[in-house]
């Protein structure tokens, strides 16, 4: 669920008065998923006995202690010092985001102000953190979720659902609020067929509920949580699907080189279509057979067939972009010329196998502008 952003520059500001030193290594490991901590500072009155447990952690984690004396009792001057430093760092324009480590709601306005400047804010605190601070962050991480647990407690608000379409019924305990969040996010991100990408669902839930974390409910990943929820259909598009499509494309390239009509047409669906530029499309196996027979009887292609992109859009549909470069030889005259096409394949899964449903291509030769030729 964390973005893959190792180059994102983050400033990590820790309210040592409201954070446990034993948790800091887990916090920094979590933050590393979101970016690189170029600044790591911990704020507090280091002359007093309250922060004694922090000193060893500061050294081992390269955290800079920021001294702030407690001028009067029951007045948290640490918060003010942390806010002032945060604004100085914000105005330096050197950072992409901040991580505020505290369970104190006094940092709510600071988080909002940083976000108003277009920077991302990650909050990190205990589960007791007031909701205003949680929702002021782009994402809020509960420290309790970062510590390895021997046993995960079940959340208090749950209901039971019987597993669907199984021979034996299994009682699954699911947080009712999470199921509702999943439903809402799926409805908002699904396509016309009702399928939604799990990554899109997770990102939308975090935008709406910054403290959402599968680990809160005992699951390491979102896909594990969703899989345990028997109210959604799950479709896993593994790398094997891409490999199968890649094999079809390589087979097509080989069939072109060998000018094998039967092998080429066999790669199409029954209602497959080829859409050549400046010619009428050919639809259906018989029309494809006639078209490729005509093509292979007139030209010989000596090409390098490269696959530029393969995207699986759903369990039944995918598209691919390819490039074919080399030479084209006219069989009647034996004249050769450079050949360079960019191609688009729409593929459909039929009877468990990927086949070409639509194929279109265009030349990559420079277009003639304001040209002239003999009429």
Image (tube, helix red, strand yellow):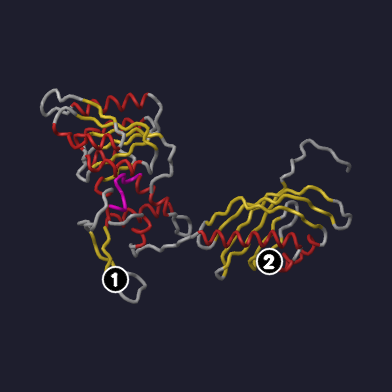
Query: x and y percent of residue 38 in the render?
Result: 37, 32
Characterize the local packing of mark 2: few (<14), some (14-19) or many (20 or more) Cα atoms within 10 angstroms: some
Query: x and y percent of residue 333 in the render?
Result: 89, 54
Task: Give the secondary structure at mark 2.
Answer: loop
Q: Of 130 and 288, which appears nearest the observer?
A: 130
Q: Is residue 78 left or right of residue 36?
A: left
**Residue at position x 76%, y 65% in the image:** 290
Tell which circle, 1 or 2, labels the residue nearer the N-terminal end: 1
Nearest-to-viewer mark from 1 and 2: 1
Q: Is residue 59 above or below residue 355?
A: above
* Residue assigned mark 1: 170
* Residue assigned mark 2: 284
Query: x and y percent of residue 273 in the render?
Result: 67, 61
Taking the view exactly as shown, the residue that stands out farthest to the bottom is 167
The magenta segment: 207-215
Task: Give the secondary structure at mark 1.
Answer: loop
Q: Quadrant of residue 253?
A: bottom right
């Amino acid at each position: 669920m964390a973005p893959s952003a190792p180059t994102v520059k983050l400033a990590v500001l820790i309210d040592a008065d409201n954070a446990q030193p034993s948790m800091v290594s887990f916090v920094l490991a979590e933050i590393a998923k979101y970016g690189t901590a170029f600044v790591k500072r911990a704020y507090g009155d280091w002359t007093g006995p309250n922060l004694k447990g922090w000193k060893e952690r500061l050294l081992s984690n390269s955290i800079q202690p920021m001294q702030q004396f407690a001028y009067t009792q029951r007045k948290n001057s640490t918060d003010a010092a942390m806010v002032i430093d945060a604004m100085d760092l914000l105005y330096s324009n050197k950072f992409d985001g901040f991580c505020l480590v505290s369970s104190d709601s006094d940092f709510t306005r600071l988080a909002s102000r940083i976000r108003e400047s277009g920077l991302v804010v990650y909050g990190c605190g205990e589960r007791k953190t007031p909701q205003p601070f949680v929702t002021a962050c782009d994402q809020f991480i509960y420290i309790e979720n970062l510590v390895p647990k021997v046993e995960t407690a079940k959340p208090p608000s749950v209901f039971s659902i019987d597993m669907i379409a199984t021979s034996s019924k299994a009682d699954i305990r699911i947080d009712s609020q999470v199921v509702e969040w999943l439903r809402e996010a799926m409805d908002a991100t699904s396509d016309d067929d009702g399928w939604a990408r799990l990554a899109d669902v997770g990102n939308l839930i975090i935008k709406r509920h910054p403290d959402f974390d599968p680990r809160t409910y005992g699951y390491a990943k979102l896909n594990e949580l969703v899989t345990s929820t028997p109210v959604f259909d799950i479709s896993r598009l593994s790398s094997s699907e891409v490999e199968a499509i890649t094999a079809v494309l390589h087979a097509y390239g080989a069939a072109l080189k060998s000018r094998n009509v039967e092998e080429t047409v066999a790669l199409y669906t029954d209602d497959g279509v080829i859409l050549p530029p400046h010619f009428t499309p050919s639809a259906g196996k018989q029309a494809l057979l006639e078209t490729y027979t005509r093509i292979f009887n007139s030209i010989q292609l000596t090409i390098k067939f490269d696959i530029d992109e393969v995207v699986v859009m759903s369990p039944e549909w995918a598209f691919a972009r390819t490039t074919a470069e080399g030479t084209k030889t006219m069989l009647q005259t034996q004249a050769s010329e450079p050949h360079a096409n960019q191609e688009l394949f729409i593929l459909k899964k039929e009877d468990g196998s990927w086949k070409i449903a639509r194929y279109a291509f265009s030349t990559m030769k420079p277009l003639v502008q304001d040209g002239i030729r003999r009429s």
